[in-house]
Amino acid sequence: MKITKRNLRKIIRKEKRNLLERGSMTAQGPEPGVDYIMYPDEYTRAAEQLLTPEEFQSVETRHAILAIDLADELAWRYEDSMEGFGSSDRTYEIQGYLNQLGFKTGFPNGSLEVIREGKMKISKRQLRRIIKEEKAKLFKEDAGIADYYKSKQKAVSEVQEEIEAAYRVLKTLDRSSGEYSDQKMVIAALEDKRLHVGYTGD
């Protein structure tokens, strides 16, 4: 009976599962002449390091078999390949393994981590940057407020000088003259202007 390569792989995979059930993951490759690029226990060790004990226990029935499947697929994929396999490739293999186990992963701080809802880990560097940015915003806002009140104060001072000059002119006029009444109206208008210019909305 002729056995196809696919059937042979299925038989080997089944035998590996049998070995796994007996507590052995020491095979050199998925089939004779094909060596592992990553051993199955590399996947499981990484999962144990990145997951909490509760999370790791929740996938206990699946993690080892999936590790064997992924290690087999990787070995067959690189069987005749001249392509290199570096540390970043290894990291992405672990990420894919964790994703298939149902965990969300990412690189929030530059290294592979499991992303848990409601928990965001912030590095000291990120925290320092956030504080620095917020301080810069506050200083900018304070500077803007200071400039605003300074311009208001200057405008009020200028109107006040106009009012004082108008009063000096008023003193030189005859109270019974029309010019005196007109100057009083000018002063009243300037005082209204001072109130308007000096209003801050506080």
Image (cartoon, grey):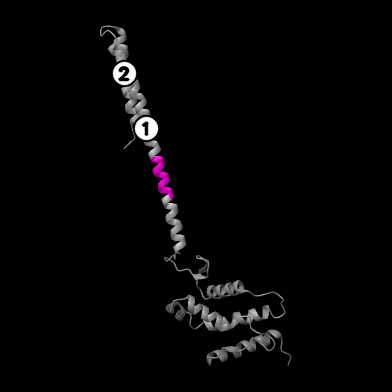
Counting other residues with Cα less than 10 Å from the Cα at mark 1, is it few (<14), some (14-19), or many (20 or more)? Answer: some
SS assignment at label 2? helix
**Residue placed at 68% from the left, 84% from the top?**
6
Q: Residue at x 71, y 89 (%)?
A: 3
- Give the residues in magenta: 136-145
**Magenta span contains residue 137:** yes
Q: Vertical placement of 5 versus 161: above or below?
A: below
**Residue at left offset 55%, top offset 83%:** 41
The quadrant the N terminus occupies is: bottom right
- Give the amino acid at mark 1: Lys
**Left or right: 193 as drawn, with respect to 2:** left
- Whichever of callouts 2 and 1 sits on the residue coming sooner in the sequence is 1
The quadrant holding residue 149 is top left
Judge whether residue 56 can be spotted in this image: yes
Identify the mark at residue 187; answer none if there is no mark. Answer: 2
Q: Looking at the picture, which amino acid does disc 2 mark?
A: Ile
Which residue is identified by label 1?
Answer: 152
Residue drawn at x 70%, y 81% as measured from the top left: 79
Q: Residue furthest right?
A: 2
Q: Quadrant of the C terminus?
A: top left
Which one is nearer the viewer's eye here, 129 or 66?
A: 129
